[in-house]
Amino acid sequence: MPATYEPIATTTLGSAASSITFSSIASSWTDIKVIIVATAASNANFAFRFNSDSGSNYSRTRLAGDGSSITSSQNTNQTELQLTSSFSIGTTPVMRTLDIFSYAGSTNKTVLFEEINDLNGSGGLNKQVGLWRNTAAITSINFFAQSATNFAAGTTATLYGIKNA
Amino acid sequence: MSPILQTLANGSAYGYRSLSAAAAGAFESIATASGTGSSGTITFSSIPSTYTHLQIRGIGRTTTASTGFDDLLVRFNSDSSASYTYHALTGDGSTASAFGGTAQTSAIIVDGLYRNNVTANTMASVIIDLVDYAVTTKNKTLRTFNGGDVNGSGKIYLQSHLWINTAAVSSITLVASGTNFGTQSVFSLYGIKGA
């Protein structure tokens, strides 16, 4: 029997890598959560996909503040969900959290996620809801670089499972 | 009968789904409830005071025959007096705004539930964190993070709430404002322990 809240897998990069993948995710939990603490050699953008689906099946609505203003925007028919929709990832460690609801259920998949990105005078906070228009159970999550810059060594990503009663 | 089992027994009156114990730890599952399509309330009752904080995670739709959202209301210990306040930050894809309210009769999670004519199988999602719920010297603070997106429209919210009452929270009632919870709605209550 799975625990209520438990780590499923952790990746710590020993060297720079263009992607991080959690695969063969069992359907044992109710929700899953990913926490990434990432750096890159220079400012770069990253994204993620479920089950390797690169179809135009992703959308999102975001709310972001950068210390002086707050904005909201939306993207439709995307081929991935951006991990850096408001703030790129650079040499200062920043955090991303993803809460993926009913990931093994029969509904389309909703993600509440955050970019926690303070850089001592710049950066900010982004709260976002994403949708993957697919009712399949999520069995893999792939985080990948959208340019030539990779995740740097030391980047960590942990996948947790949350099981209801 | 333990409080958790009492919750199971009480749950049948509110449309609870099956309950089964999960393994214990610092973050424990207390109870899960599903919408029935014919009831506008879901109640977690007989909540033990053995945790430090509580979290509710859920996905929801209502039976309202239109598009858009309905509010998700939260009441503690069946209190519907004007003792709740809130502040909200929100974005709808084009405009970001902030607003709030005082003397409310519930904690209002604005647009916490999708209506029934929204794209099929698409759910609004919410995380509710209630800190120090059993401490009797503090009014109760609640943080909610909720949103929904249907590829071209959507909303995202971050809210703070206050229940101006120092009583320990022993029951939490979720209300689909002016409507009923759809059958795909599922809400789970978790307890978070301190060291």
Image (spheres, rainbow, N blue to C red):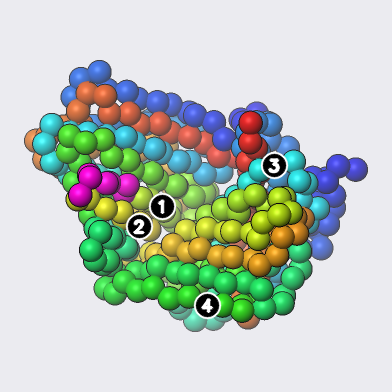
Image quarter in which the N terminus of chain A is found: top right
**Which residue carries the number 1 mark?**
A111
Residue A116 belongs to the span the image colors magenta? yes
Asked whether disc 1 touches disc 2, contact meaning CB atoms under 8 Å apart, the reply is: yes
Q: Earlier in the sequence, mark 4 or mark 3?
A: 3
Disc 4 chain ID: B
Q: Earlier in the sequence, mark 1 or mark 2?
A: 1
Disc 1 chain ID: A
Q: Quadrant of residue A96?
A: top left
Q: How many marks?
A: 4
* Residue A66 in the figure: left or right of residue B131: left
Image quarter in which the C terminus of chain A is found: top right
| Spot occupied by residue B8 in the image (x, y as percentages of width and height) | 80, 50
Q: Spot the residue most to the left.
A: A148
Q: Secondary structure at mark 4?
A: strand
> Which is more foreground, mark 3 or mark 2?
3
What residue type is disc 1 on?
Answer: Val
**Which residue carries the number 2 mark?**
A128
Mark 3 and mark 2: Cα distance apart in space: 29 Å
Q: Which residues are magenta?
A: A115-121
> Which is more foreground, mark 2 or mark 4?
4
> B127 or B152, which lies in front?
B127
What residue type is disc 3 on?
Answer: Tyr
| Spot occupied by residue A153 in the image (x, y as percentages of width and height) | 22, 23
Residue B51 circle label: 3
Local crowd size for mark 3, using a 10 Å CA cut-off: few (<14), some (14–19), many (≥20): some
Residue B101 circle label: 4
| Badge 1 and badge 4 both on one subunit | no
